[in-house]
């Protein structure tokens, strides 16, 4: 089966605890629950794209440990091509420590582990996977030189290239923008990339305009409950979010990215793909966890606005 979407990125095991609120510095809180859940932005986006109708291949690294075996097995259950998920020795698999509060906001600490070993050479070894793709997705949870290589190679191959710049704490390298078809940050990432605060629809428009001036082709800023903002230099359009009751926002952005990519790979229009991704992301926040919260194609197709 041809891989229509290829994800170059991270695989983490998420260690998730829920508490009434997020702890302050130096504070110990009693948690309400604990779970071990497959995650990582790359793997989440791969699972989302697969559940939402695309044929998917994953390029990434895991450690030679139990978590690595579980992460690979989880992707295989989703019928994701894992030939390019490479096991590296002398390092753990990636781990994310996540605290979710009673209002469904989260705080996350990531240990890169095997994700830090994903090199340009490893990606190059699986160039046939990139060549098969319609859409290539990257994030920033693997080394920057690897992301740069994947973006450049995607552009050389004429693929649709998506960068979800997460986590971002500074502007992107200037020469990356011309390699990216869709730059998809959330509010905090858009603020880090643009140098502008993003706390309203108007400020999101200002940030998107600055990113376009920096060289971005098309920008989609995800705004949580406020929906998303699309800008391409010709128009700026706000897409309100579907109304749902949020339980856990973990992986909502990843679900949007995976759904958006899957829709593009299936030949949907840009606007259709955004709306499709938004429904998928909205459904994900009604459920707990990262990958367990990601809906299926049937879920999205059966969604009706309450």
Image (cartoon, rainbow, N blue to C red):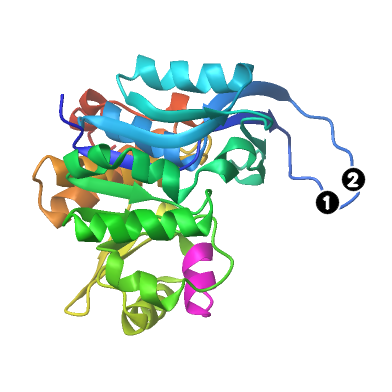
Please indicate whether residue 17 sits to the left or right of residue 246 in the image.
right
Q: Nearer the viewer, residue 88 or 138?
A: 88
> x, y (%) of residue 252?
43, 42
Residue located 43% across and 29% down the image: 85
Asked which quadrant contains residue 132, the reply is top left
Where does label 2 land, which residue?
Answer: 27
Q: Nearer the viewer, residue 19 or 84?
A: 84
Marks 1 and 2 close (CB-CB < 8 Å): yes
Query: Where the C terminus falls, by quadrant?
Result: top left
Q: Residues within 10 Å of mark 2 (few under 14, many from 20)?
A: few
100 to 139, vertically: above or below? above
Q: Nearer the viewer, residue 16 or 279?
A: 16
> x, y (%) of residue 93?
61, 30
Residue located 16% across and 47% down the image: 264
Label at residue 24: 1
State the extent of the magenta-drawn residues as a range. 188-197
> x, y (%) of residue 217?
25, 72
Residue located 51% across and 59% down the image: 144
């Amino acid at each position: 089966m041809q891989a229509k979407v290829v994800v170059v990125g991270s695989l983490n095991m998420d260690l998730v605890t829920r508490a009434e609120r997020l702890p302050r510095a130096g504070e110990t809180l009693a948690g309400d629950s604990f779970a071990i859940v497959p995650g990582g932005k790359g793997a989440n986006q791969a699972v989302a794209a697969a559940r939402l109708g695309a044929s998917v291949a994953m390029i990434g690294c895991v450690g030679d440990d139990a978590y690595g075996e579980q992460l690979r097995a989880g992707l295989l259950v989703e019928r994701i091509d894992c030939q390019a998920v490479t096991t590296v020795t002398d390092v753990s698999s990636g781990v994310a420590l996540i605290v979710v509060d009673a209002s469904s906001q989260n705080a996350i600490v990531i240990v890169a582990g095997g994700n830090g070993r994903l090199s340009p050479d490893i990606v190059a070894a699986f160039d046939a996977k990139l060549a098969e793709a319609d859409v290539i997705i990257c994030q920033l949870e693997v080394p920057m030189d690897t992301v740069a290589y994947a973006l450049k190679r995607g552009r050389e191959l004429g693929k649709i290239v998506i960068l979800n710049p997460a986590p971002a704490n500074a502007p992107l390298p200037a020469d990356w923008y011309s390699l990216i078809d869709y730059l998809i940050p959330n509010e905090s990432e858009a603020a880090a990339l643009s140098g502008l605060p993003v706390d309203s629809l108007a400020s999101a428009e200002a940030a998107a305009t600055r990113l376009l001036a920096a060289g971005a082709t098309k920008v989609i800023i995800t705004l949580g409950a406020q929906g998303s903002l699309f800008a391409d230099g010709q128009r700026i359009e706000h897409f309100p979010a579907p109304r749902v009751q949020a339980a856990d926002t973990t992986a909502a952005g990843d679900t949007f990215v995976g759904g958006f990519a899957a829709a593009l790979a299936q030949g949907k229009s840009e606007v259709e793909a955004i709306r499709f991704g938004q429904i998928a992301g909205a459904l994900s926040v009604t459920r707990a966890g990262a990958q367990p919260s990601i809906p299926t194609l049937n879920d999205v197709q059966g969604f009706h606005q309450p």
